[in-house]
Image: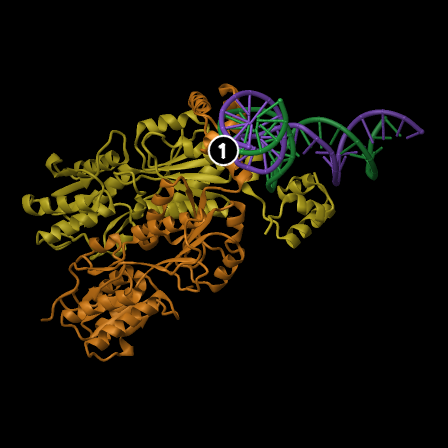
Chain colours: A orange, B yellow, C green, D purple
DNA sequence: GGTTGTCAGTTAACCGGTTAACAATTTCAA
DNA sequence: TTGAAATTGTTAACCGGTTAACTGACAACC
């Protein structure tokens, strides 16, 4: 069946295509109430749906937002299995849809980078999540494309950033353990990058220790990748070789679950023998056994904020390069931290 | 900076835009090797990237695939937090990207349905996942759009379907419990719809019971929604009111985790007091404590197959309306089923 | 009365590709 | 030698919108 075009509508309404276009785009003062009515009538009768490709071609606005998340090592799949990313995507999509935008989800392929997609699809903007390759950002700077970063350490004000106070988060988690009487506190974490979010949590961890008069022991820091498997490994290590460790702060819930598994496998119970606190408050945190105590960072809400921020940047409502927006954190006490008092 | 167009390329290469277009689209025998070389050279030098909007407008192919997944009750967010969906999306995206397509992820809004998106964006096809509204499918039939359904019970051959043998899956899970000496076996499940996947698993459950000479007890079937919360409720109920139940088959891993929590809260241990088997083998299944025994259905792989199937339908390689493709299932034995022997 | 301004609407070029129809040249068979 | 067919390339219309520039009609002002 033939597509209904703006010309069909204009004929039916007895006006020009320009008039229809003006009605469609709500152009003030270009068209009389009478005409508006006729056009709307015709649109309804013909069940007219505008073609975004044509629109995009004509005015260079695609109503399409790129959302970039990390991929698996082998570049074959998006890391969407990881609830951290999927929950962000949920929040982002909700806000975009509400504003009449669609989302194109993708990763960054090595080599061609992201510019291809961005150019091919005429993206109106992009939200970047969890990508830490300098070169990628250098590339992005060359394009004039509104961009919002989430949790990125590129704080040179070239892009909008929606972040959290990671230092405070690390502090909060560690202090909670200390308040419960723990003194041998391990940190299990992903790679500590200069100025990265994890480094900040690490700093918060050290601040809490110091504040409590505890000695910082570098041996108690287990640094690797942010995966369940690595957490498991670290948990096993702790169980076997560090009897003085009674509590673990994992900088991500996935890792925390891994730590719990590792401890369990080595015959230690959580929180009976060792307490564990996570970070993120993913939806799986409340499903673990026992349910995981963690630091909530309202992921979906932040995703939604990022989208909002991007939309404002797109229609110029927003400041050019504001300070990073930091959303509040809160401790969620569940069942993996035992009081030693 | 001005966009590089096909005209820029044609000038640089000293040929017509048609020639460039033919090179771009690999048109056989329309262009000499010499010209191909010149054009490719020009493309490289100018760093030309074609505009998909223009392309879509001209030949009515958008290289865009719609992926539809369920939303939360209040229609505000996609159900992407649920790993079941996000793992499917991963598999789908991987295959699509590989074939040069992009994905537009969305839900079905009540009212306007999906046609708006489909028409606006000139989608080349769609993959539908976990949507059970009759009206939605009726609407889809009206559009001539290649479509692949995943796990849908609309088996009237209007659409391609990628499914699993749910009856067999239900049988597999239940038999595993029986083989381990269980006789009081509960079924905790989402809503049992006529001809739906869950009904089939239910049928498999009954078949296994019958085969083993066990009595089917309708009181042992707990039917509600597919959520952690409901599983928790059912788990509590089982612990308090059904002492003769020693094993639970939950038709989804999320529910299984909920059941475990409910049992734990009521003071029962898994698998010490009650055994639990799930379904899906989500990535979180191996992270639970103890790790969840379940039925694997290779979700990401199936997503990838669905995408493959759709791509074939799009370029006419595939059969018109083949029988549903069923992918194999397998039992994954972990730590939540105890042998009573 | 003539000039200017405002309002409502139209015309037609343009966005960046694709492709049917045609043209020029070469190849080859009769 | 002539005509047909194949090869390679170009021209220009078209996809479905947007929008700058223009037109007419009418009102307001000096």
Q: Could one spot residue B59 in this view of the protein?
A: no
Residue visible at 24% across and 40% down? B170
Q: Vertical placement of A290 versus B179: above or below?
A: below
Q: Residue A157: which quarter of the image?
A: bottom left
Q: Nearer the viewer, residue A149 or C7?
A: C7
> On the rendered structure, is B108 left or right of B204?
right
Q: Position of residue A276 (x, y in %)?
A: 20, 65
Front position in the image: A24 or A228: A24
Which residue is identified by label 1?
A: A51
x, y percentage for residue A341?
9, 71
Question: Residue D22, image x and y in percent?
Answer: 63, 30
* Residue drawn at the location 19% of the way across and 76% of the way down: A212
Side of A298 relative to A117 (left or right): left
Element assignment for label 1: loop
Residue closest to the eye, A230 or A18: A18
Q: Relative to residue B90, is residue A333 depicted above or below?
A: below
Q: Position of residue A36 (x, y in %)?
A: 44, 25
């Amino acid at each position: 069946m033939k597509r209904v075009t703006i010309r069909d509508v204009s004929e039916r309404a007895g006006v020009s295509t320009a008039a229809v276009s003006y009605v469609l785009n709500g152009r003030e003062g270009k068209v009389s109430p009478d005409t508006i009515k006729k056009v709307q009538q015709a649109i309804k009768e013909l069940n007219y749906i505008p073609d975004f490709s044509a629109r995009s071609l004509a005015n260079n606005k695609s109503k399409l937002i790129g959302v970039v998340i990390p991929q698996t090592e082998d570049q074959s799949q998006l890391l969407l299995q990881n609830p951290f990313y999927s929950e962000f995507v949920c929040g982002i999509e909700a806000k975009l849809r509400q504003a009449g935008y669609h989302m194109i989800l993708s990763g960054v392929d090595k080599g061609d980078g992201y510019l291809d997609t961005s150019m091919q699809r005429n993206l109106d903007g992009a939200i970047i999540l969890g990508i830490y390759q300098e070169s990628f950002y250098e590339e992005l700077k060359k394009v004039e494309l509104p961009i919002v970063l989430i949790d990125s350490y590129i704080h040179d004000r070239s892009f909008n950033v929606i972040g959290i106070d990671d230092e405070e988060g690390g502090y909060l988690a560690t202090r909670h353990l200390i308040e419960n009487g723990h003194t041998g506190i391990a940190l299990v974490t992903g790679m500590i990058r200069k100025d990265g979010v994890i480094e900040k949590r690490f700093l918060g961890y050290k601040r809490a220790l110091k504040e409590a008069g505890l000695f910082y022991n570098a041996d108690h820091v287990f640094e690797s990748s942010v995966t369940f498997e690595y957490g498991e490994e670290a948990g096993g290590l702790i169980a076997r070789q560090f009897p003085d460790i009674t509590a673990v702060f994992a900088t991500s819930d996935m890792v925390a679950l891994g730590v719990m598994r590792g401890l369990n496998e080595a015959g230690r119970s959580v929180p009976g023998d060792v307490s564990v606190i996570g970070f993120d408050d993913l939806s799986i945190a409340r499903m673990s056994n026992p349910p995981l105590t963690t630091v909530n960072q309202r992921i979906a809400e932040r995703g939604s904020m990022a989208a909002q921020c991007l939309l404002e940047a797109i229609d110029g409502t927003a400041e050019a390069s504001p300070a990073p927006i930091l959303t509040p954190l809160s401790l969620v006490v569940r069942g993996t931290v035992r009081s030693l008092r």
